[in-house]
Amino acid sequence: MKKLFTLAAAVLFAMGMSAQSSPLATFISVEGNCNYIDFQKDGDKTVNPPATSTAPMTLSNGTVIKGFLKTDGKESETAWNVKDSYGMEIPMPDLCGTGTNPATDSTYMKVGSMLKIASNCSLELGAFTCIGGKVRVYFQPNGDSDRGVAISVKGGTPVEILKSGLKNGHKMRPGYIAEVDLPAGQYVAGDVVIKVASNTINIFGVEIQGLYSTGIQETMAEAGVRYNGMEVINEARREMTIFNALGKMVANTTDNFNMSQMPAGVYVVRVAGVKGALKIQK
């Protein structure tokens, strides 16, 4: 009888422990994970181009977003758009299966703003240093079919990641993390390219595991880049790119650049591995 009581007590204790440890919802904060591009932050949002524009747009870290035409050749304003208020919790089936209850499913992605971008558009990441890890793209198919990205590193074969946008009982279409290995090393602008592989998707941000942040936090002044009214001075002889007010690249050099032959106007100077930009008025 004593053994039976002991067994019953052990079962009740185990049941109690099981009830206490039942999984509650876990939320991935995109803002906390996307350390390289985060469309949740005002500083990384871009201004929508005019409906007839296909000019590249450059983010604060030197990343260039290209191509605003859909594959059928018809231009669409929605092919390039930063939506300021998304405010959703997106289920992550790769991480939590196909459950539908936020109170019990283990993982959801918490998002705010996002970039809606069409097929064949691309993100050419700016310069950075990595101590080894992965590049991860947080995205959501913007429709019921398989959609996603193709990621290439230093001109290698693109790795295509396509995922279904079917809701499967969820109120929201699911979200995913596309990732590829990123060996340790220094990456110049354009070494890592993220291309939209099929139709339209929503991109919430890009994470670089093993991101070496010291160089990225350096300012333009610390890098010795300045404008003296005639030349853009590049003391450290780093890769320097200059854009006009339309976002068109007008120079790419590791030397000083003489502005005397350039038309009057506003220009933006970016330097590989340096956060921010130098805005000059000629």
Image: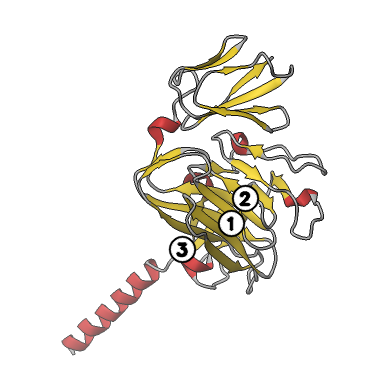
Q: Are marks 2 and 3 in contact (CB under 8 Å)?
A: no
Rendered location of residue 36, percent (x, y): 50, 42
Q: Residue at x 31, y 78 (%)?
A: 12
Kind of residue at badge 1 = Phe
Crowding around mark 3 (Cα neighbors within 10 Å: few <14, some 14 to 19, many 20+) is few
Q: Position of residue 5 (x, y in %)?
A: 22, 84
Q: Marks 3 and 1, Cα distance to the nearest angstrom?
A: 23 Å
Measure the C-alpha gap from mark 2 to mark 3.
Answer: 37 Å
- 217 and 53: which is toward the camera: 53
Question: Counting other residues with Cα less than 10 Å from the Cα at mark 2, is it few (<14), some (14-19), or many (20 or more)?
Answer: many
| Label 1 SS | strand
Q: CA distance from mark 1 to mark 2?
A: 14 Å
Where disc 3 sits, the SS reads loop
Of residue 255 and residue 117, the one placed in the foreground of this image is 255
Dot 3 corresponds to which residue? 24
In this view of the protein, can residue 102 be seen by the observer?
Answer: no
Dot 1 corresponds to which residue? Answer: 139
Q: Quadrant of the C terminus?
A: top right
- Place residue 245 in its image quadrant: top right
